[in-house]
Amino acid sequence: MPTPLMSLPGGPAEPVAVPRAVPPRADGRLDLVGLDRAAIARALVESGLVEPRQARMRSGQIWHWIYNRGATDFAAMTDLAKPLREALAERFTVSRPEVVQAWVSADGTRKWLLRSAGEAYEAVFIPDADRGTLCVSSQVGCTLNCRFCHTGTMKLVRNLTAAEIVGQVLLARDALGEWPSAPDGRMLTNIVMMGMGEPLYNFDNVRDALRIVMDGEGLALSKRRITLSTSGVVPMMARAGAEIGVNLAVSLHAVTREVRDEIVPLNRKWGIPELLAACAAYPGANNARRITFEYVMLDGVNDSDADARELVRLIRQYRLPAKVNLIPFNPWPGSPYACSPDERIARFSALIFEGGISAPVRTPRGRDIMAACGQLKSASERLSRAELDRRAAAKEAAW
Ligand code: SAH
Ligand code: SF4
């Protein structure tokens, strides 16, 4: 089991090193999902089933089956000899997270409650006319306790493994019937690391998972179609740019220290000047690939004309190639804020546009199934383990 992350009293938690090793399965088989090609090749050789000189070729074939064809069964890998397929199945597995429950919103948004290694987490698919976006979780829960975010109220937190992160993409592809991986006409075209958790507090697993997702011979999503959202883990931002290279979104949400300290407590550690300087240095940010600033609209908290003007001033001061994404606050049971009225959001957006910066308002999606931004809090917290098991079993029986 990965080491759980602990919330430290009095401030945001430090990222805790989590063992990189894939947690051993009860049946002793090694899961190939989440390993890079070299690691698969090594595992094949170590198993004694594949000669070192054939390891590259065999791992390439297996990679293709897993990430291009969506195979979960070695028996399907027909370009491998039958005895090898049988031997592989005894030593290895190609896993999926278990689907505990799935929902479909009136607007077509889908949410999955998933479980692996005991804990539950969520993934959300948002279909649009010109794209389909999968919102992927990086952690079970989150240590950061932003005041407006449901996920931040979860007590239990652990990092997801690379297999669990990639697994969300594989599972969505299964559900959408999108195998083999086609270059054009896909439903799942974009990925946002905007589900549960802070991706830069689980850097290695997120990087490894996204590299697999971007691999041209597998899922083959371009880095331009992937966006990583951070609440502002400043020391990791340069590495994210250099080692992952996807689009960056930053949860800014406030333009003064007082307000940001209050609603995004991580600001007490790395303030707005440090955060914006890190954005200015983000590799690959230019006018064609702007940084997105996410800004949740909280009634009477961060939504004044002065806030909008200060936002424009800051973006100019740091010469940021930026756009702003205004997110109407999505309520959750017990949430301490209300969403700004529509006219206020429209005025806020107009002021930013007048400053020459694009500031569309994000349409809330999947609110009816609690799938909208900031509403994710896995039902694992509200349901007992027995109830989770019961629902998973009922789902299986229905198939
Ligand atoms: N932890 C990362 C990734 C989560 S992204 C981050 O914070 O950036 C989810 C986005 O939704 C973030 O911008 C987050 O601040 C925002 N959000 C959280 N709670 C929300 C809520 N209740 N309503 C609207 N947006 C919310
Ligand atoms: Fe964590 Fe992001 Fe929610 Fe803040 S907004 S608590 S960083 S998931």
Image (cartoon, rainbow, N blue to C red):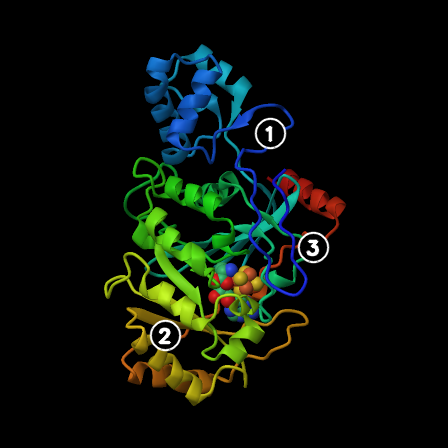
Q: Position of residue 85 (x, y in %)?
A: 46, 17
| Front residue of 254 and 218 | 254
Sequence-wise, the earlier of marks 2 and 3 is: 2
What residue would you read off at disc 3? 381
What residue would you read off at disc 2? 360
Mark 1 sits near ligand 2, with its Cβ under 8 Å away: no
Q: Position of residue 325 (x, y in %)?
A: 40, 71
Element type where label 2 sits in the image: loop
Query: Count the marks: how many?
Result: 3
Q: What amino acid type is highlighted by mark number 1?
A: Pro
Element type where label 1 sits in the image: loop
Which quarter of the figure has residue 155?
A: bottom right
Q: Could you tell whether 389 is left or right of 47 in the image? A: right
Mark 3 sits near ligand 2, with its Cβ under 8 Å away: no
In the image, residue 366 above or below residue 40:
below
Q: What amino acid type is highlighted by mark number 3?
A: Glu
